[in-house]
Amino acid sequence: MEFTETYKQTGPCAFSPNARFLAVAVDYRLVIRDVLTLKVVQLFSCLDKITYIEWALDSEYILCGLFKRPMIQAWSLAQPEWTCKIDEGPAVWSLLNTACIHVQWPKHGSKGVSFTKDGKFAAICTRRDCKDYVNLLSCYTWEIMGVFAVDTLDLSDIQWSPDDSAIVIWDSPLEYKPVLSCGSYDQMIRVLNHLTWKVFAEFTHLSTVRGPCAAAVFKEVDEPLQLDMSELSLSDEFAKRNADYAAEAYIQFRYDVMEVPITLPSQKPAAEKPNPKQGIGLMSWSNDSQYICTRNDSMPTVLWIWDVQHLELAAILIQKDPVRAVAWDPTCPRLVLCTGSTNLYMWTPSGAYCINAPFPNFSIFDLKWNSDGSCLLLKDKESFCCAAVPLLQESSDYSSED
């Protein structure tokens, strides 16, 4: 895996849908870089600090959310002189002309809106008279097609299905109703059939894993890297001065394959704090829908990977630090994750790997794939780098070194 040098960022970063460009927020500036060379191809100046970025599906337009104003500015890569500024109330706007649809009683300020993949329709959550509704909008005729009430107490968000044939809504955690795959406070996920909408699988996150178990259990370990310096002529002063440094600098990280039964590291939520972190706090499907990865917040250093096709646990990754972010390769069942350390972690059906970023003070807090799976964005608090990710040869043997 090859890494680029690091570059400055102060906010959101986003790959374009065509995988050619990377948009980076640097305070008031929107920097557009070429993905292959990371050279700056466009630079736009916004009116305030950028807090949100989103590309148009054709990768020609990009919008910036300036939530302190509140305001949205949009830019065109093909026509740098073209600009757009929106500072009105809730509405759906066309970037081709001045057509728009004003939305009354929006439920949320920064979520509760979902567009179909082709951009023809939008679904928006609204609430009036203590009742939740979904508004269906046409982005061709610019009219409201219909409004229907939904059976929720506190509608949390909305999403179109991948084929645009259905709309999924979910209630707040205070009202439990499982949909598709649902992570819950009871430390279980439930998977639903998309035709009957009935639960066909339940996966439990237990603190102790016992056999028989087909899953591979990987545990992150670190150990000093053994360097043979017996044949080197070093002065006593040099050896003493570097002894403490060497103990910390030459450490290698890897996965050990563990045997079951095994007790996983867990923690009890603080009883005196409201809304404690427990239950399923992270869940993500692989692009081919064969796997789901989950994190139970009662065991924040453990990542579970479930094989939905065989309805069984595929792997468990036990990290030294809490799992912060995960991302599936959009082209194959390959998962990357980060924990805020200088390491990048990867899992495939063949095994798990620890990869060290070549920057000693670069801690990985977030990561994203571009759409063709060839490039990975790694974010520190105030900088980022990219990594060229090669295709991995699949093997039947688990490995812990790369």
Image: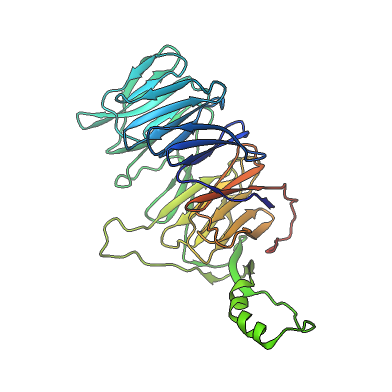
Outermost residue toward the bottom in this view: 236
Compared across the picture, whether 21 is left or right of 99 comes to: right
Q: In the picture shown, does residue 251 fall above or below 113?
A: below
Q: Where is residue 231 in the image (x, y as percent from the top left)?
A: 80, 83
Residue 293 visible, this orientation: no
Q: Residue at x 54, y 28 (%)?
A: 163
Q: Residue at x 45, y 46 (%)?
A: 10
Q: Quadrant of residue 145?
A: top left
Q: Position of residue 95 (x, y in %)?
A: 45, 19
Outermost residue toward the top in this view: 141
Q: In which quarter of the image is residue 401?
A: bottom right
Q: Position of residue 279 (x, y in %)?
A: 39, 56
Q: Quadrant of residue 92?
A: top left
Q: In the picture shown, does residue 255 fall above or below 201?
A: below
Task: Decide which of 204, 239 is in the foreground and name it.
Answer: 239
Q: How many labels does the image show?
A: 0
Task: Decide which of 289, 23 is in the foreground and name it.
Answer: 23
Q: Where is residue 356 in the image (x, y as percent from the top left)?
A: 63, 60
Q: Residue at x 50, y 59 (%)?
A: 340
Task: Decide which of 148, 327 is in the foreground and name it.
Answer: 327
Task: Decide which of 111, 307 is in the foreground and name it.
Answer: 111
Residue 52 visible, this orientation: yes
Compared across the picture, whether 148 is left or right of 348 comes to: left
Outermost residue toward the left in this view: 129
Outermost residue toward the right in this view: 231
Quarter of the picture containing the C terminus is: bottom right
Q: In the picture shown, does residue 174 fall above or below 228?
A: above
Q: Which colour scheme is used?
A: rainbow
